[in-house]
Amino acid sequence: MIDIEFVRSRFIKHFDGKTGNVYTSPGRINLIGEHTDYNGGFVFPGAVDKGITAEMRVNGTEDTVMAYAIDLKDRVDFHLNDPAGPKASWARYIYGIAKEFQKLGVDVKGFNIAFAGDVPLGAGMSSSAAMESCFACGLNDLFGENKVSQWDMVLAGQATEHNYCGVNCGIMDQFASVFGKAGCLMRLDCRSREFEYFPFKPDGYRLVLLNSKVKHELAGSPYNDRRNSCENVVKAIAKKHPEGTFETLRDCTWEQLEEVRAEVGEEDYSRAHFVLGEKDRVLAVCDALLEGDYETVGQKMYETHYGLSKEYEVSCEELDYLNDLAKENGVTGSRIMGGGFGGCTINLVRADLYQKFIADAKAKFAAKYGHEPEVIDVVIGDGSRRLC
Ligand code: GLA
């Protein structure tokens, strides 16, 4: 986690010398359940020990926000009443959360904010959700008497992505960032929003991320196309079955998908096929974990990678190669993590194979792509909170 004093020193330097309150929110991993959140399915994420830390203070103005992104050394001032909002993409997260809080009835006024992060950007670890949740946590404390519920903070983060950043995401990332708990993964039913904490201490195994450093950028990306494909299939099924209620792919069966195959075309069919399989895999992984059956967990992770690569088509050459290297090294489970199009693989590896796998993956990946993948050991941490 980012050192509080580091953020504080920048906050003091860039504004009027006064200190504020400090808030932090984490990025996340996801063991399994990818692209299922906006399809009403299950996800299985956990918060990590890396995220975004922000110092914030009410500045006494009606609507002026003075914001400093410490890592980018970029200062942007903007007005909450300006309907266009700031141009800088990082500042739009602050603007978006503030606007969404106003919609919730919170009387957000001018404030100063400086923030920094240690969750890698564009790595599929939800750096943007970490920002949204961190800013939401701060605004709730500064202007909302902490009365905005955790779920409303999650939804304000998601709405920020939809309304100000161009990504039609689901709720997994913001959920994990707000609700995270050290040592626990969380199984969330994205339709009912019920969830359970799962203590996660795989004896004799380690979870490690390999970051390909291929930057994934979800805004204006094929991410939204994938979501459209899923919605097309749901519409086609609903039309064929006027007697039923079909809101998302969660409500659809394998048979119904087959019925509309010709009509929706192979691309949309394959994407929906992946989603139906993924829904079942999350539940199978939860059952296997309860029995300590890591072989099944790992096998499902490989199946997910295959589906994300060949059916959902959100992989890239580098991620497929990292997956192949995991297989070659006898790693128990490995797959793309997050939205795809770059970023990390998540690997469940036996502790006795760990050193050899990491060394081999680094050497072979570097020989092929000219740089080593970044190795990120996963530590499951707590969700959004005020630090001081
Ligand atoms: C991104 C989105 C999430 C989710 C994942 C894929 O991280 O923000 O809502 O859809 O991709 O599982």
Image (spheres, rainbow, N blue to C red):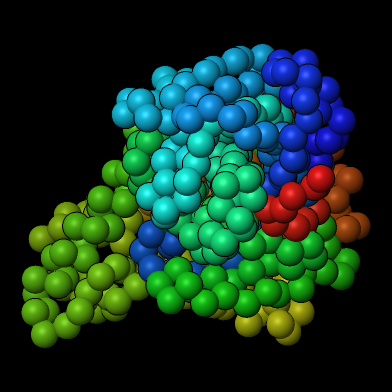
- Position of the N terminus by quadrant: top right
Name the quadrant containing residue 243: bottom left
Q: Give the side of residue 185 with respect to residue 301, left or right.
A: right
Q: Is residue 14 in sight in this rendering?
A: yes
- Residue 276 horizontal/vertical position (percent): 38, 69
Instruction: Name above or below for residue 112 compared with residue 209.
Output: above
Comparing 269 with 223, the one in front is 223
Residue toward you, 251 or 365: 251
Q: Residue at x 64, y 50 (%)?
A: 141
Q: Position of residue 45 (x, y in %)?
A: 62, 61
* Residue that appears at 31% across and 61% down: 272
Q: Residue at x 13, y 65 (%)?
A: 236
Residue 24 position, x and y percent, is 72, 45
| Number of on-image labels | 0
Residue 359 image offset from top left, x and y in percent: 84, 37
Instruction: Report whether 31 appears left or right of 202.
Output: left
Q: Residue at x 47, y 21 (%)?
A: 78
Classify residue 138 by image quadrant.
top right
Viewer can see residue 126: no
Which of the pair 361/276 is nearer the observer? Answer: 276
